Image: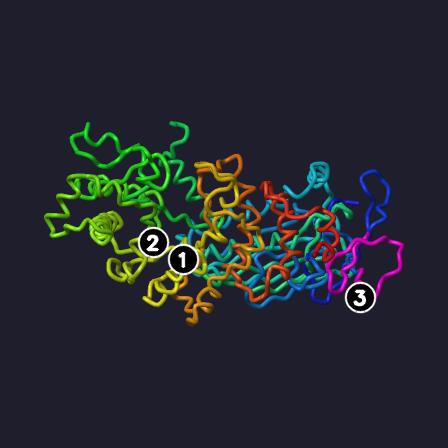
Amino acid sequence: MDTKFLFFIGLFSIAQMAVGQSRTGEASPWAWACRTGRGCVKVEKDSPVEEGDNMNNPTLAGCKLTCNDESVLWPKPRNAIYLSKTLVSFLPIDIRINRINAPSSEVKSLTNEAIAIFRGVLRKSIPEAFRRRNQTAKDGQRPQIHIEVSITSGDVRLAMETQESYNLHVKTIFATAATPASPRSTTSVSITATTFFGARHAIETLSQIMAWDKTLESMIMLTDANISDSPAFRSSDQVYQPEDIKELVHYATVRGVKIVPEFDAPGHVGSGWEWGERAGMGQLALCLNIEPWHDYCAEPPCGILNPINDNIYSVLSNIYQDMNDLFQSDIFHMGGDGVKFTCWNETTEIIDWLRARGRNDYSKEDFLYLWSHFQNRSLEEVDIAYGNKQPIVLWTSPLTDDGHAEKFLDKERYIIQIWAKGTDQSIAQLYRQGFKLIMTNYDAWYFDCGYGQWVGNGPNNWCSPYSGWQKVYENSPRKFIVNFNETFNSQQILGGEAAIWTEQVDGAAIEGKLWPRSSALAERLWTDPDTNWRAAEHRMNHHRERLVQRGIQADGLQPEWCHQNEGYCFL
């Protein structure tokens, strides 16, 4: 038997599949039933079929693709969806890209890269022995997959207003007789989208209705599908060179990811500013590496920019210009996190500056006035660097709390990113004041929480406990607003972001800490379902397996037995 892929398609089609033999030549005694109220459950082949069991696709991969109304799609589509319950087999080398209708060569090039990634995903799913057989398979009687992609917009910048919706249509026609000139089936895949990013999402969805079936030694794919979808929200060797950043931005763009640059100021500047006095520019930053650090800053090493040194703004201007040139983003994050006033309060020139402006109390309000001076001057430099007044993001801080945002910040320019708890009243206050918000509440969407303490004697870090994928999934910004007795306005809640900080994570550990929890975040923000995590558990477990298959070191969720016996691992 030729090695084949099974492709999940078919409206009025029948795909006959026999349960194959194991690699040792011995037939497996197991099959999988789609059990009502459970999901895919392992059963003995020769055992009586229980009432409510569907054995039409008796392999694990086949059952997973057809048992659930949403198949194993992640995130779950928000809009119209039809997925057939029948399968067709095919060879990866028989996937044909018939046409890419694109308005520009750049859009077409990006689409070709996305298709190359798609082909790479399929290759990773096939064991090497079968991959070699695919290369030498004969042409006769093989199914063929024909893909057409149509994109209407030439915009290749992923902006806040970018249209990311798509339509994916899959249709299989089975021939009555197969010949080399007329294969036994032809599957047509049509992808239409306004932008490249919508088309990329459709290609990813297409990959998710295909699977390698170990039992059949074949790929399987749904015979027919109609999906329309759209989002609910919108050392020297450790230095990023400009070429590195450009490569990273392109890598993200092809995968439908937008990189938003953040330059955090005036706090979190412990290193890199020592040269100011040597260059005749005065102190660019104050209290550098001062001790005890916890009196002056959020974490070591300490440092805060000097807001009354005019030279700091010319330096910032150059940095902002470089960031604009490299990231080409329509939104800029100015940070504003981790500011303590102790250093400013102990700096003579700061006190003199405040006194000259009639600020003699040196109170919190006085230092917020100083901070707003820095923020306004910095914003002027951002606008010059970018050549327009693009949206600005700031973290919640004393500058945004207790009514200060309304006093110091323009709600038409500033987006506030929330890192307080999801029940914090500051969220309701900012929402009522009309600010646009991005949610990153630490009690659910800080992915470094729940690990050991890295400063101090506590057993766990400050934001413990750990948030499992279930908590990540059920953290709904929409429900936050409703719980504050406010009417939800999607024009104000722009979406959310999971955060993981590098105090306790590096390249060796990041994948397991991010995945599959980030997938739970993705479905919450894309689909924002009313159902809870239990309704998504089977798909999540399968999606985690898919991530590992694609080479991502995603953290484990349950024993494999639970993946093979849906609905039985619960309390």
Q: Amino acid at mark 2?
A: Val
Could you tell me if residue 276 is visible in this image? yes
Q: Which residues are magenta?
A: 31-55
> Given contact means CB atoms under 8 Å apart, are the residues at marks 1 and 2 in contact?
yes
**SS at badge 3:** loop
Q: Which residue is mark 2?
A: 393
Q: Earlier in the sequence, mark 1 or mark 3?
A: 3
Residue located 15% across and 48% down the image: 354
Q: Looking at the rendered structure, which numbered label has been put on residue 438?
A: 1
The residue positioned farthest toward the left in the image shown: 356
Is the residue marked by circle 2 packed among few (<14), some (14-19), or many (20+) residues within 10 Å? many
Is the residue marked by circle 1 packed among few (<14), some (14-19), or many (20+) residues within 10 Å? many
Q: How far apart, in angstroms, are the residues tagged by discs 2 and 3?
A: 53 Å
Q: Is residue 50 left or right of residue 302?
A: right
Residue located 33% across and 40% down the image: 297
Q: How far apart, in angstroms, are the residues tagged by discs 1 and 2?
A: 9 Å
- Quarter of the image where one finds residue 93: top right
Residue located 19% across and 49% down the image: 362
Q: Nearer the viewer, residue 347 or 57?
A: 347
Is the residue marked by circle 3 packed among few (<14), some (14-19), or many (20+) residues within 10 Å? few
Q: Amino acid at mark 1?
A: Ile
Q: Which residue is mark 3?
A: 52
Image location (x, y in percent) of residue 117:
55, 45
Could you tell me if residue 109 is visible in this image? no
Image location (x, y in percent) of residue 166:
52, 61
Q: Is residue 370 left or right of residue 63?
A: left
